[in-house]
Image: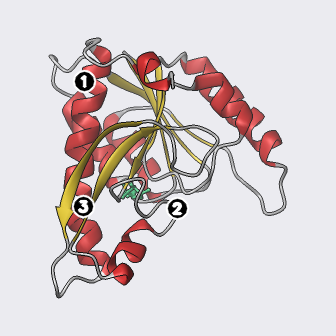
């Protein structure tokens, strides 16, 4: 199964997926890496020999116009699945219409707890004893799409946003690797998830 992954940051979760996909028996391959900016994680394209593209989101840009450019950059790779792994941008409706439900996002919280761009910081600020990691199907809500899989992560008393996020990410990586494998082997059918 061909997968396109979109990032905005370091791409450490993407690296985990790329390393898993290196194994001949992994049933999916990353065919392109895209970003909305010159993300550090694009260097993984060079390292793993995978094409990359940037569709810049310039301030004040029309979101649907950006979405149309993003679709034009993704479609030539003919992905069966698009994964947002640290894309710090809400994808517009035209992108959702084009790819969902074969459109996943990883989120560093136990949704519906702590949606949005600061899920780790918000969980810490809430003073709760645990948070989590979630893989969801992207819909027009902010992190409110169908939950495909999620797992709890404990918060420790001396946690900072950074230490907590670094404890959440390995869980995200494992959930992402397992979920992409399950979709590629038809163990999970995302079309079932998207029906109410
Ligand atoms: C991940 O925790 C992802 O869920 C969140 O941003 C982080 C991306 O980290 N949206 P990285 O770029 O994969 O290191």
Horizontal relation, residue 94 to residue 173: left or right: right
CA–CA distance between discs 3 and 2? 16 Å
Q: In which quadrant of the rendered image does the N terminus lie?
A: top left
> Which quarter of the picture shows residue 165?
bottom left
Q: Alpha-carbon neighbours of circle 2 within 10 Å: few (<14), some, or many (≥20)?
A: some
Please name the residue that numbered disc 2 is placed on: 116
User: Which label was assigned to residue 76?
Assistant: none
CA–CA distance between discs 1 and 3? 20 Å
**Residue at figure coordinates x 24%, y 41% from the top left:** 175
Please identify the residue farthest to the bottom as the structure is shown.
158
Q: Secondary structure at mark 1?
A: helix
- x and y percent of residue 141 in the render? 61, 46
Horizontal relation, residue 88 to residue 16: left or right: right
Please name the residue that numbered disc 3 is placed on: 168
Going from N to C along the chain, the mark reached first, 1 or 3, is 3
Mark 3 vs ligand 1: CB below 8 Å? yes
Q: Secondary structure at mark 2?
A: loop
């Amino acid at each position: 199964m061909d997968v396109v992954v979109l990032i905005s940051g370091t791409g450490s979760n993407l690296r985990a997926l790329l390393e898993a996909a290196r194994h001949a028996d992994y049933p999916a391959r990353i065919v392109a890496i895209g970003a909305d900016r010159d993300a550090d994680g694009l260097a993984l394209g060079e390292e793993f020999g995978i094409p990359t593209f940037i569709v810049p989101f310039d301030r004040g840009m029309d979101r649907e116009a950006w979405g149309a450019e993003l679709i034009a950059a993704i479609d030539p790779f003919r992905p069966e699945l698009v994964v947002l792994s640290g894309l710090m941008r809400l994808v517009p409706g035209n992108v959702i219409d084009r790819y969902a439900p074969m459109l996943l996002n990883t989120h560093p919280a136990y949704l519906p707890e702590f949606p949005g761009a600061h899920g780790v910081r918000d969980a810490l600020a809430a003073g709760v004893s645990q948070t989590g990691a979630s893989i969801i199907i992207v819909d027009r809500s902010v992190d409110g799409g169908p939950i495909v899989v999620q797992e709890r992560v404990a918060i420790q008393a001396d946690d900072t946003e950074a230490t907590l996020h670094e404890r959440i990410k390995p869980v995200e990586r494992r959930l992402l690797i397992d979920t992409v494998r399950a979709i590629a082997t038809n163990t999970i059918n995302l079309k079932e998830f998207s029906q109410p």
